[in-house]
Image (tube, helix red, strand yellow):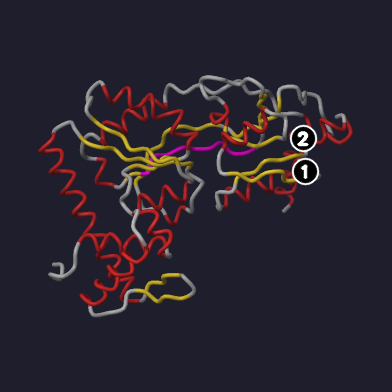
Amino acid sequence: MLHADITFHQLRIFCAVAQAATLTRAGKQLSLAQPTLSQQLAKLERSIGAKLFDRTRNQMVLTEVGRFFLRQAQLILDEVDQAQIGLGEFAAGLRGVIRLAGLNSIIRVLVPNAIARLAETHPDVEFDIHETAPAEALDLLYNRAVNIGLIAANSVAQSSVSFKKIPLTEDPYVFAVPSGLRLAEVLDPDASLSPAERKIVNSCIQFNFGTQHTRRIAHWYQRVLPRHRLVTQCRSYEVALGMVRAGLGVCLVPALTAHDGHAGMAGIDLYATDQPSRKTVALVPAQYLRVEPYKAFLRALQAAAGTVRLPHILPPPPFIELAADSHQADLTSA
């Protein structure tokens, strides 16, 4: 049982700070000022009679008591969330608000179709959509700011994910280049292309999600285009593809990010690569799998995923195939 002076608000703040590790990040996620967080944490520590965090260099590190209390707080909040879901369903029937977070490229392809399907049986459901990087979507889930996260399965460390994973789509990584750049017979970009074309091919746009996946993409550029230079780091596939369309460089992207349903593939060609496909999943706290409207929306997401069609993808250029063969040979010999 909770101490009489401890509030659910304090528990949510405590869990958010424990997950974010800084008051700044937790404040942004909860839309609360840092002084408010500090005051509530101080009250919580007084109520418990023990120190929950060691505060060093702007980092909030859990004490041994804090680690124990975090497990208990999460269990309590899970029970409260489940009770609220059940009460909301009982009182309002098919009404509710679904909060979800994820990459724009995933949300844009799947969510409109899924919402349209859900509206057939749950017309009064509202949506609160956050376009975020994978790590931020995970933080929002941990802090109970959203109900569903839409991310690539390999974009966050598997050991850090404690949610149910619902498989949705799978799309290959492709090499996106400006349409005027013909690579179908190119064995060596530095020998076969004009100076202007070589500059484009060796001008690479990379993504900075702060994950192991990001490092894997950087290694691919090093292996396939050893003379490349990094021209831009960004956090949006859409921004990168806009740069490709303008002739500023090339990028490696999941195929579905290159088809927006309006401009389509205008100005961009896609070539197959040897990279593993992106597997998109919905991350969901277990309690949402059993109640409406979340249960129905997850079914709608899976149905929408079944209708997705990949854009046109050209065979890999010879220089990408050669790099893939050489890489496989190195792995075999090792």
Taking the spot 22% from the left edge, 28% from the top edge, the residue there is 124
How far apart are the two marked residues, 1 and 2, measured between alpha carbons? 8 Å
Q: What stretch is highlighted in magenta?
A: 275-283
Circle 1 crowding by C-alpha within 10 Å: few under 14, some 14–19, many from 20:
some
Under mark 2, the amino acid is Val
**Magenta segment: does it hold 169?**
no
Asked if disc 1 and disc 2 are in contact, CB closer than 8 Å, the reply is yes
Q: In this view, does 284 lie to the left or right of 314?
A: left
**Residue 14 position (above or below residue 178):** below
Residue 189 lies, in percent from the top left, at 83, 34
Give the residue at the far left of this rendering. Answer: 91
Taking the spot 44% from the left edge, 50% from the top edge, the residue there is 136
Q: Is residue 81 left or right of residue 318?
A: left
Question: Which residue lies under the disc numbered 2?
Answer: 201
Residue 334 lies, in percent from the top left, at 72, 54
Question: Which residue lies under the disc numbered 1?
Answer: 228
Whichever of callouts 1 and 2 sits on the residue coming sooner in the sequence is 2
Under mark 1, the amino acid is His
